Amino acid sequence: MSELLIIKVKVREACGDMSVATDFIDALNEHVNEVVKKAIWRAKENGRRTVMGKDV
């Protein structure tokens, strides 16, 4: 598993009264990691050292 970038408590709060399985947290964290990696790649490809919203 990748480094945890999300806050489990906040995810559970966002889900309200729904139960949240551990595999959901893991899958969401992996998705966030991939989005961040792609945004970093895009910023570098555009000659920037700053990751911006448009990179997402």
Image (tube, grey):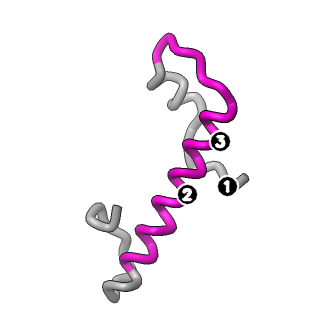
* Position in image of residue 34 (x %, y %): 52, 60
Q: Range of the magenta residues?
A: 16-43
Give yes or no for contact between labels 2 and 1 (Cβ–Cβ under 8 Å).
yes
Q: Of residues 10 and 31, which is closer to you in this image?
A: 31
Task: Let me know if residue 38 is in the magenta part.
Answer: yes
Q: Earlier in the sequence, mark 2 or mark 1?
A: 1
Find numbered disc 3 in the image and state the secondary structure of the residue it sits on: helix
Q: Which residue is mark 3?
A: 26
Question: Relative to 18, is 44 above or below?
Answer: below
Quick one: label 3, few (<14), some, or many (20+) residues within 10 Å?
Answer: some
Q: Is residue 55 left or right of residue 30?
A: left
| Secondary structure of the residue carrying numbered label 2 | helix
Find residue 53 and report its horizontal and vertical position in percent. 29, 61
Residue at the spot of label 1:
3
Residue that badge 2 annotates: 33
Please tell me whether mark 1 sits on a helix, a strand or a loop.
loop
- Left/right placement of residue 22 relative to residue 10 reads right
- The residue at the point 60 percent across, 23 percent down is 20
Of circles 1 and 3, which is in front?
3
Assign the magenta stretch its main secondary structure: helix
**Distance of mark 1 from mark 3, alpha carbons?**
10 Å
For marks 2 and 1, give the CA distance: 8 Å
